[in-house]
Amino acid sequence: MILKELLESNNLKFDDKFYEDCEVFTKLLQQWGKVHNLSGRLTKEDINENILDSLYPLTFIENHESFADIGTGAGYPGLILVIALRDVKSYLIEPRIKRVSFLNFVKASLKLENLTVLCNRVEEVKDLKVDLITSRAVTNTSLLLDITKNIKKENSSYLFYKGSMLEEELEIAKINNYKIVNRKDRNYLYVKGK
């Protein structure tokens, strides 16, 4: 299924520029991915599914003025969210230099003026506070809450892309005021700021 049909069948609508940008992202990821081992899944279908996975929470989360994605890697979900939300101040925090180089190359190629890429571990980031903190496949929920506290505002929200261990993680993390949305094998954990 082509990307536009896939997204629209999941109630996600974007303009033509978004789809052009996704096409550039896909080509760059396929080129860089083979050389730098950025992702094991480089077919167009796999990339489209990862784009959908990255964007699906836009169907149920609130709007935010800024966000930071922790451990962005090959661009999921952070870079895809940046492309979709060009009016939102965005930060991608990734400690590995090869991945940072790729993210910066895509940033320059797509002229993503709303994006800052930080080559750092999130717990070492200073002077940054955001409205929404996102992460996919980085670590458990409790540790994510702990290592991101330095970039959190008093009323920041969280959006974590989680797998099957989520229930156990929630018990350990002792959080409330959250919503879990499930799609296929993915659990989206949205913790709304107070």
Image (spheres, rainbow, N blue to C red):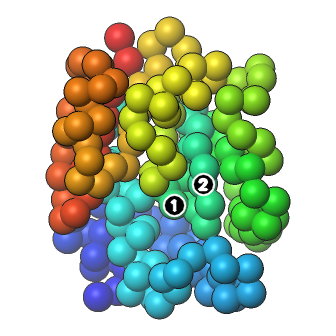
| Quadrant that contains the C terminus | top left
Q: Percent position (x, y) of residue 116?
A: 75, 44
Using the image as rendered, state which of residue 162 and residue 172 is in the foreground: 172
Describe the element under mark 2 as helix, strand or loop.
loop
| Quadrant that contains the N terminus | bottom left
Q: Which amino acid type is shown beneath numbered disc 2?
A: Thr
Describe the element under mark 1 as helix, strand or loop.
loop
Disc 1 marks which residue? Answer: 76
Disc 2 marks which residue? Answer: 72
The residue located at (59%, 38%) in the rendering is 68
Instruction: Please say whether residue 24 is visible from this viewpoint.
Output: no
Q: Is residue 188 left or right of residue 40?
A: left
Whether the residues at callouts 2 and 1 have beta carbons within 8 Å, the answer is yes
Q: Which amino acid type is shown beneath numbered disc 1?
A: Tyr
Instruction: Please say whether residue 159 is visible from this viewpoint.
Output: yes
Q: Percent position (x, y) of residue 149?
A: 57, 20
76 relative to 118, above or below: below
The residue located at (23%, 19%) in the rendering is 177
Q: Percent position (x, y) of residue 144?
A: 49, 33
Using the image as rendered, state which of residue 50 and residue 84 is in the foreground: 50
Q: Would you call the spot at circle 1 few (<14 residues within 10 Å), some (14-19), or many (20 or more)?
A: many
The residue located at (26%, 30%) in the rendering is 170
